[in-house]
Amino acid sequence: MFIVLDNGERVSNEPEEIRLLARLDGTMDELRERVEQMVYDDGDRWPRWRNLMAALKTRSVHADDPAIAALPLNLEFTAEVLALYGPGRPTSGS
């Protein structure tokens, strides 16, 4: 996960890695919904956001839990994921 600051800098929670197991027979919309649930789930987000908030603090950016939760969610997928879920891929009904 990362946040893009007004100056264009990407602030990330790396080296932490987030993995999501998803069904391969789902749609891109279902994948997006699952990712959104994972990112914004109240019970699970704090460990993922802690490093991100610390990285922002080193840049003098105040970002608490509600501030991060209010940001729009933009997803970037790797080429491998796009090949699995993108247009023209085989579906389970095909």
Image (cartoon, helix red, strand yellow):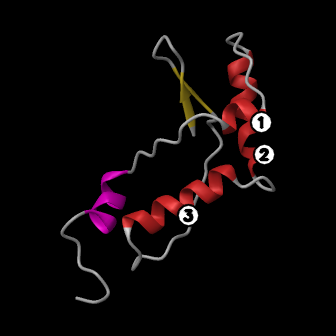
In the displayed structure, would residue 77 be above or below residue 52?
below
Image: magenta residue range: 78-86
Q: Is residue 85 magenta?
A: yes
- Disc 1 and disc 2 in contact, CB within 8 angstroms: yes
In space, the residues marked 1 and 2 are separated at their CA atoms by 5 Å
Q: Secondary structure at mark 2?
A: helix
Residue 50: assigned label: 1
Is 50 positioned to the left or the right of 17 in the image? Answer: right
Is 67 positioned to the left or the right of 10 in the image? Answer: right
Of circles 1 and 3, which is in front?
3
Q: Which residue is mark 3?
A: 34
Q: Secondary structure at mark 3?
A: helix
In space, the residues marked 2 and 3 are separated at their CA atoms by 18 Å
Locate residue 82: give its quadrant.
Answer: bottom left
Is 18 in front, or is 73?
Answer: 73
Q: As shown in the figure, which amino acid type bears the numbered disc 2?
A: Pro
